[in-house]
Every structure is written in C-alpha cells, then in structure tokens.
Amino acid sequence: MTKTYEDLIRELKETIQKIEDDSTGLEESIALYERGEELVRECERLLNEAEVRVTTLTQG
Amino acid sequence: MGQGEGPDGPAVFGVAEVTGIIRDALDLPELSGLWVRGEVTNYTHARSGHRYFSLGEGQDRERALINAVMFRGSACALSFEPADGMDVLAYGHVGVYGPQGKYQLYVEDMRMAGEGEKHLLVERWKRELAAEGCFDASWKKEIPMFPRRVAVVTSPTGAVLHDITNVLSRRYPLEVLLSPTAVQGETAHLEIAEAIRRADGLADVMIVGRGGGSFEDLFPFNHPEVVRAIAACETPVISAVGHEVDITLADLAADLRAPTPSAAAECAVPDRQRLLEDLGADRRRLGNGFIAALERRRAELEDLRLRLRPGRPRRRVAEMRQQTADLEERLLRAAAGKVKHERLVLEGLKARLEGQNPYAPLRRGYALALKDRMAVRSAGDLGPGDRLKLILADGQAEVIVECVHDDKDVRRPDT
C-alpha cells in the first residue's frame, strides 16, 4: 500500500530533524538530503495530482 | 385594608388581602411553567403590541376557558399570527391579575399545535438522548488532519453533495464516498440512520448534511434513530444540517458542527495551498540543514589540514580561497539536488586513485623490477651480476643482470 500524506510528512519532519542534528555524519546527511527531496516531491505530487473521485455506496 | 371585626365578630378581610391569599394559593410549581393546549378565542392584538385572548376547550358544561395575555416582548418572537379558532400550545405561568379580579395565563411562547407538539417532542428526545450520553463532549472524536476518504451522507440529488465536492476539489481533492439517503419524508430518519451506519468505518471522516429547510423539513435530523446512529459512529462525524440558525439534535451529537455543507467540507480537509507553502518551507529547511552539515565537515577538514601543514601562510590563504570557492560551487550544485552528480565525480576520483596503484600497470604487461626491495628507476642503478626481483601481474621471478645499456644518450620518441 502506498504511503499516506500523513506518513510522508512525518518522515520528512524526521529527516529534517536528523539532518539538522550536529552528530549526523556526512554520508548520512547526503542520504537524508536525497530522501528529503524525494519526500517533498512525493508530497507535492500527491497534492497536485489528487482528484476528487465520488463512489456511491449501494443501498440496501 | 386591614383585618377588622365584622358585626357578628368573625374576621372580615379586605379585597386586597383576599387577592393576596388567592395569589399565594396559586403559587404552585405546576402552574409556574407549563404548556397548555387549547383553542384561541376572543383574540385581540392590541395597539400596544400585547395580545389578549382566551384558550378554550370542550362544549357546553364540559367547556373550560382560561384567560391569557402575551406581552409584546414575547409576542414579537411568534412564528405565526394567532387567530380565533386556532389550536395552539402556549407556554407560561398562571398568575392573578388583581385589578380585574381574574387569574390568567401569562404566555411566553406559543406554537401551532401540530408543529408545537413536534417541538415538545424534540425537547423530550433531547432530554432522553442527553441522559443516554449521546451529546457527551467527552465522547467527541478528533477530526483527522489528513483524511484519505470522506464519506458524505446526504441526498444523491441535492446541492449538498455538489457543494461539498466543489470545496474538496479546490481545497484537498480526495475520494468521496457517497452514502445516499432521502433527507425528508415519513421514513427519512430510518434511511438516514441506515446510511450513516453503512458508511461508518469506511472513511476517515463523515459529513452528514442537508440543505436549508423548515423545522418540519429538518425534523428527521432530530429523530433519535439518527442521533443514536451518529453518536455510535466510529468515524468522526461533521454535521451540516440546514442553516446556521437551525440546530438539530444530530448537530449536537456530531463530533463537529458546521454551519453549512461547504463549511463542513472545509472542516474535513486541510487546504493544499497552505500545505504546499509548508512544503516549500520544509524544502528550504532541508537544504539549509544539508548545507550546514557540509559546512561543518568542511570546517573540520580545514582545521585538520591546517594542523597537518603549518607555515606558508600566504599560500595557505590562497589555497583556502580556492577550496572555499570549490566547496561553494559544490554546495550550490548539491543544494540544487545534484548530489548524484557529486557521486559521479567521486567515482571518477576513485578511478583516478586506482590508477595510482603501483600494481595496476602490471595488468597491462609491465613488470616491476626491485633491487634490495627498492624499485629500480634507472639503468644507472644497475650493474652486471645484480640480483633483481621482477614482479609480474600474476607472480614473481628472481633474475640476474647480465649487462647494462644506459640509454641516456639515445634519443627516445617520447622525450
């Protein structure tokens, strides 16, 4: 199942906190930065590509 | 007038005194706030704005009548103009009007009997449902921040669904699950309750909505069936029934009440424009964090370098400037999302480093000659009889030099 916006935002916030942490190593910072960029793009994609779909529950 | 002696001795009362006794006698809890049903007679709408009339019931000897007055302060809230013959419910208290020697009903609220009964019914339901805990604030659920699916319980043909999808399209498009139901009519309350139960658990938030209408039109949303269905929902419910001024029991049971269906849609989802702005801020923070991380490493490296190579300050400053410029360039590229490019550069550097491996040329057919464990770089280092070790890509050989030709005077093509 694809991640929800909520999951992505939570991961993005964690990524930012980690990259801002002085004890994070350079290699990890690079990986975090790449991941963060990916998360931002994915969030933007979710927001921009979303469309309203109406499904109707059958009665009875 | 005070109490005095009658001609034959028994007590004689003044009129005011008797009136007082009667007033006290009528000061009963049952008469201090009650609904009375009756037919309006002798109705007068005085120029002062006060309404004078009687409420009657029965015929001939069964006939009962009570005088009533409704002062203009209360009368201005009337939703209809009373008239003789009308069947009404009047709320007020019974009191004595001394100057005219009569008791009367002081009316504060009056409704036509059919509708009035429904109001009374709603009030009774409200008490009962409150006792059941249907309106308890402690049971109210949070509306989720980022729902994936919104269930809408409403008429499939009304404007409500349209209004809601309109707002959602603009604000935060997502899946809408319509649980269709009639919203008015004799059995509407059963259908609405069923539609709520059917949608429960299938979405992250539910909107129960209906457009504006009369008290009668909104009546199903006061029905205990609907109220209990909302209160029992696992899914958080936002109600939007009628206009802002109409508050139904369904609204009281919902986790959140919105004044209109459009407002309910706004309450159900965040605004993506805001979210995109927030994302922009997050991206900047991420980039700044990364640049700060690179800067930290650069500073550390610089510190180490300076400690390794003291002296030559001028040259060092020039080198530092060059390095800083290089790093800036790299930072800009990296911050622009070109970390991958950096990786490629790093790979290239690694490959070049690999080229410095003294054993690498052996794979291309060269041999390394060692004399006393030192690489032989010049023919001048050798003399006949020297023992050498030849290192090849896949093994070694011990050799003895027979004779030496020094090429120093020979012109070679690559010099």
Image (spheres, coloured by chain):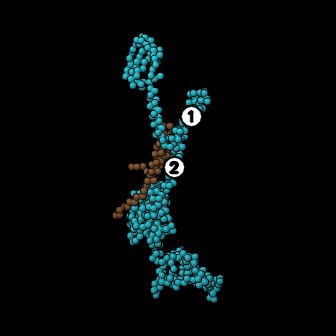
Locate residue B168, reporting x and y percent: 45, 59
Spatial distance from mark 2 to mark 1, Cα to Cα? 32 Å
Locate residue B43, reporting x and y percent: 53, 84
Residue at left offset 39%, top offset 62%: B179
Disc 2 residue crowd, few under 14, some 14–19, many 20+, Cα 10 Å: some
In the drawing, what numbered circle is on residue B322?
1
Q: Label 1 marks which chain's residue? A: B
Depth check, front residue: B76 or A28:
A28
- Image: B149 above or below B110: above
Q: What residue type is disc 2 on?
A: Gly
Colour chosen for chain A: brown
- Image: B125 above or below B356: below
Depth check, front residue: B290 or B317:
B317
Q: Label 2 marks which chain's residue? A: B
Residue farthest left in this picture? A60
Residue at left offset 43%, top offset 13%: B404
Q: Which residue is mark 2?
A: B280
Colour chosen for chain B: cyan
Q: Is residue B299 visible?
A: no
Dot 2 or dot 1, earlier in sequence:
2
Tell which tag, 2 or 1, sits nearer the viewer: 1
